[in-house]
Image (cartoon, helix red, strand yellow):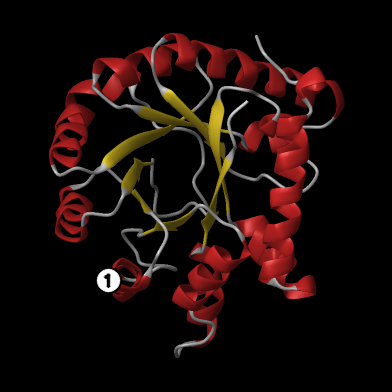
């Protein structure tokens, strides 16, 4: 089974910085620490309201980062221009509403194919790997293929927030969606809300190639350091991926 990649989202290092103003804590420093701790990539979401990551952060990450940068972005002309100017390794299209605290729900690809297709095309033409943040829903996966996206990231929030039998049901939805993604020729990632408790079962899904985790790791860094939190998460992922006897498949 292939090694599972870990993308570390540094948005909420910037959230803490922006709460007080000034340069500290520095999200670019956090990105460097994540690289040293074993992250495979860095994710940063440049929002319309710039509530955490700033334009300067994106510029500095592009200049200083040794790992691939995954730019989370809304499908707007402003964000497309920024992505084309900085040409990150990857761009993940996400839904965005100004009033939400964090990304709520997946991108509605099926109903917005005509609007999203040009964004996917222009990003791909610039050599940027495009992914779509979607619910684990076959209809959305099929729409992703139709608009030419090579990668999807399955929204794990409902799974992480559920308990008991409801969590098992949400996990099964993700397992089945990952299998559909593989059948459709899509590279499959997963993320949102994952923690030490919830990452393992997702890591056991053999055709998930990458997990993207941010808020939880930044929170854990308060108590034990970012290096420790990332290394512990990497160990959980590695054990789960090695546990082929318990690997989940549809």
Seen from this angle, which residue lies furthest right?
164
Q: Quadrant of residue 45?
A: bottom left
> Whole-percent x and y of residue 178?
55, 19
Q: Residue at x 50, y 72 (%)?
A: 32
| Residue 198 visible (yes or no) | no
Q: Residue 108 or 142: which is nearer the viewer?
A: 142
Seen from this angle, which residue lies furthest bottom?
22
Above or below — where is 142 with respect to 124?
above
Q: Residue at x 14, y 32 (%)?
A: 118
> Whole-percent x and y of residue 104?
51, 41
| Residue 174 visible (yes or no) | yes
SS of the residue under disc 1: helix
Above or below — where is 241 with respect to 175?
below
> Whole-percent x and y of residue 133?
43, 35
Q: Residue 49 or 170: which is nearer the viewer?
A: 170
Q: Which quadrant of the rendered structure holds the N terminus? A: top right
Q: Residue at x 71, y 28 (%)?
A: 204
In the figure, is residue 70 to the left or right of 174? Answer: left
Above or below — where is 73 with respect to 115?
below
Residue with the mark numbered 1: 59
Total tally of numbered discs in the picture? 1
Callout 1 crowding tier (Cα within 10 Å): few <14, some 14–19, many ≥20:
few
Q: Residue 89 or 38: which is nearer the viewer?
A: 38
Q: Quadrant of residue 91?
A: top left
Q: Residue 45 or 179: which is nearer the viewer?
A: 179
Above or below — where is 34 with respect to 185?
below
In the figure, is residue 21 to the left or right of 162? Answer: left
> Whole-percent x and y of residue 147?
23, 21
Q: Which quadrant of the rendered structure holds the C terminus? A: top right
């Amino acid at each position: 089974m292939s090694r599972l990649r870990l993308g570390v989202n540094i948005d909420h290092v910037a959230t803490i910085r922006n709460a007080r103003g000034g340069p500290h804590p520095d999200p670019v420093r956090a990105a460097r620490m994540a690289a040293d701790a074993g992250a495979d990539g860095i994710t940063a979401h440049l929002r319309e309201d710039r509530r955490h990551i700033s334009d300067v952060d994106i510029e500095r990450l592009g200049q200083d980062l040794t790992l691939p940068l995954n730019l989370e972005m809304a499908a707007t002309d402003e964000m497309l221009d920024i992505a084309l100017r900085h040409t990150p390794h990857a761009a993940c299209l996400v839904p965005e509403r100004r009033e939400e605290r964090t990304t709520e729900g997946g991108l509605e690809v099926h109903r917005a194919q005509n609007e999203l297709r040009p964004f996917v095309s222009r990003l791909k033409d610039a050599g940027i790997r495009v992914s779509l943040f979607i619910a684990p829903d076959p209809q959305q996966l099929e729409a992703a293929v139709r608009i030419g996206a090579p990668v999807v990231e399955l929204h794990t929030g409902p799974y992480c927030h559920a308990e008991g039998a409801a969590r098992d049901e949400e996990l099964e939805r993700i397992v089945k969606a990952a299998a559909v993604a593989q059948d459709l020729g899509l590279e499959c990632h997963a993320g949102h809300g994952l923690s030490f408790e919830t990452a393992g079962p997702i890591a056991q899904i053999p055709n998930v190639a990458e997990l993207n985790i941010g808020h939880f790791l930044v929170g854990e860094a308060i108590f034990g350091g970012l290096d420790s939190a990332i290394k512990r998460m990497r160990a959980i992922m590695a054990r789960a991926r090695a546990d082929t006897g318990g690997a989940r498949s549809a």
